[in-house]
Amino acid sequence: MNYVLLIRHGESYTNRTGILSSELNKYRLTDTGVDQVTFTGEQLRGLKFDGIISSPVLRAVQTANIISQYLILEIKVDGRAIESDFGEYNGKRIEEIPDKKREELGMESFESQKNRMIDLINSYDGNYIVVSHAFPIRCALSYYLNLNEEESFGIDIRYASMSLINSSKKKILSIGSLLLTEKIKNIFTA
C-alpha cells in the first residue's frame, strides 16, 4: 500500500460489557458505536481510496459497511485484520484474566499480530482503509515506530478512530484521530 488508514470499529457490546471476544458473529455495534462510525464516515466523504479491507468480526464488518456508504467502495474481508486470538480467555471478562503476559496465557503474541498486520499492509497496492481492532492496530503502528509491546502500551486507539500510515515511506501521519486535517484530506482528493 502507499497509504493505509487504519480504523478501529465503533463501540460494540464486547466493549460495553468488558468481554474479550474474537467470535465472528456474536457482538454487534451499540447505537453509540453506530453514531461514532457515522461521524468517521462523514469525515471520509468525498475522499479517494482504492478499497476497504475489514476484519471478519461482525463489529468490524458493520463499521466497514457504514464507512462504505460514504465512499461507495467495495469491502474485502481479510482474516489478517482479525481481532486477537484470546485462546481460552475468549468470551471472558477482562477482570477475570490473570495479570500475565499474553504468551503465558495462551493468547496470540504481539509479534504474531504485528507480523500479520504488516503482511496485510504489504500485500495490497494503492490507498486502502483497513477496519480492525485496537490491539492489531497498535501492533501495526508499533512496527513503524519500532516499539515493542511494553513500549507501545500508551498508544490509545479509540472507537472509530483513524490512524494514517504512509507505508511506502514507513511514516505515521496520525494516530487515533477522530478528525482529519486538511493536510491529510488533501492526500486523498485527487
Image: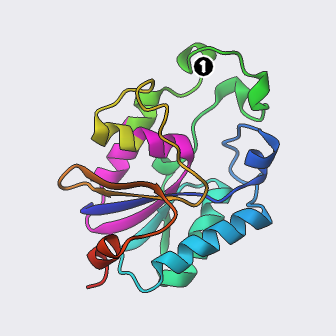
Q: Is residue 20 magenta?
A: no
Name the spot of residue 103 as percent of width and height, x first.
54, 18
Look at label 1 and name its amino acid: Gly
Residue at horizontal 50 percent and vertical 71 percent from the top: 75
Q: Nearer the viewer, residue 22 or 19?
A: 19
Name the spot of residue 69 as percent of width and height, x first.
57, 82
> What segment carries the magenta color?
115-139
Residue at horizontal 25 percent and vertical 54 percent from the top: 167
Q: Residue furthest right?
A: 17
Q: How many marks?
A: 1
Q: Is residue 131 magenta?
A: yes
In the displayed structure, 39 sits above or below 165; it is below
Would you identify the image quadrant in which residue 123 lies? bottom left
Residue 113 vs residue 41: left or right?
left
Residue 183 vs residue 86: left or right?
left
Residue at horizontal 54 percent and vertical 47 percent from the top: 82
Residue 114 vs residue 8: left or right?
left
Q: How is the image coloured?
A: rainbow
Q: Quadrant where the C terminus lies? A: bottom left
Name the spot of residue 110 as percent of width and height, x first.
46, 29
Q: Quadrant where the N terminus lies? A: bottom left
Q: Secondary structure at mark 1?
A: loop
Query: Does residue 116 appear in this view?
Result: no
Residue at horizontal 77 percent and vertical 39 percent from the top: 18
Would you identify the image quadrant in which residue 130 lies? bottom left
Name the spot of residue 84 as percent of width and height, x first.
57, 37
In the displayed structure, 144 sits above or below 74; it is above
Q: Which residue is mark 1?
A: 106
Query: Does residue 181 appear in this view?
Result: yes
Q: Nearer the viewer, residue 93 or 161?
A: 161
Q: Residue furthest left?
A: 169
